[in-house]
Image (cartoon, grey):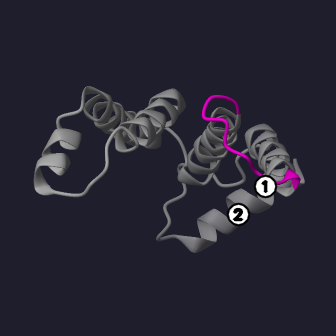
């Protein structure tokens, strides 16, 4: 899922830089670009895969993990593949993101998936029981 997102965004980046948007024919030529079309197809696949993943796990874990990994990989590709110049603080931010992804990924779920959101007392009991173990 993350690779389809990262590669889709990279291909979009490459596709839009292939031409200048100065007239309607240039816009139509850009839209028909194989690079841009492939990027869009990969991003559609990413959305479908994301929906499938969200249907199997808690949003509070799935979204931070996938977004964090995606940002770190995209940042690396931008710097090394596209030779984008960024300040050292950018790299430090990516390191902090990677640390956050590790923390989210290694922490256990604190809410029972069986406790409905409409029952706050059941969710509180589930959280309390998790912390007591």
Residue 82 x %, y %: 60, 35
* Relative depth, front residue between 96 and 119: 96
Residue 74 x %, y %: 61, 39
Q: Disc 1 on helix, strand or loop?
A: helix
Q: Residue at label 2? A: 125
State the separation of the CA atoms marked 2 and 1.
6 Å
Residue 18 x %, y %: 36, 38
Question: In the image, which residues are magenta?
Answer: 80-88
- Say whether residue 130 is magenta: no
Residue found at x 77% / y 49%:
97
Q: Residue at label 1? A: 129
Q: Disc 2 on helix, strand or loop?
A: helix
- Say whether residue 83 is magenta: yes
Residue found at x 73% / y 46%:
85
Q: Are marks 2 and 1 in contact (CB under 8 Å)?
A: yes
Instruction: Classify residue 48 as left or right of residue 8.
Output: left
**Quadrant in the rendering for residue 71:** top right
**Quadrant in the rendering for residue 103:** top right
Instruction: Classify residue 52 as left or right of residue 31.
Output: right
The answer to whether residue 7 is visible is yes
Residue 20 x %, y %: 31, 50
């Amino acid at each position: 899922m993350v690779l389809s997102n990262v590669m889709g965004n990279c291909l979009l980046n490459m596709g839009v830089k292939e031409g200048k948007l100065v007239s309607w024919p240039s816009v139509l030529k850009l839209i028909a670009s194989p690079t841009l079309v492939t990027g869009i197809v990969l991003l559609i696949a990413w959305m479908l895969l994301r929906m499938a993943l969200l249907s199997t796990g808690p949003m509070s874990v799935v979204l931070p993990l996938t977004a964090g990994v995606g940002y770190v990989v995209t940042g690396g590709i931008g710097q090394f593949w596209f030779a984008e110049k960024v300040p050292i603080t950018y790299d430090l931010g990516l390191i902090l993101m990677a640390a956050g992804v590790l923390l989210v990924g290694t922490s256990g779920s604190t809410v029972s998936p069986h406790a409905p959101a409409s029952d706050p007392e059941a969710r509180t009991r589930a959280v309390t029981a998790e912390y007591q173990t």
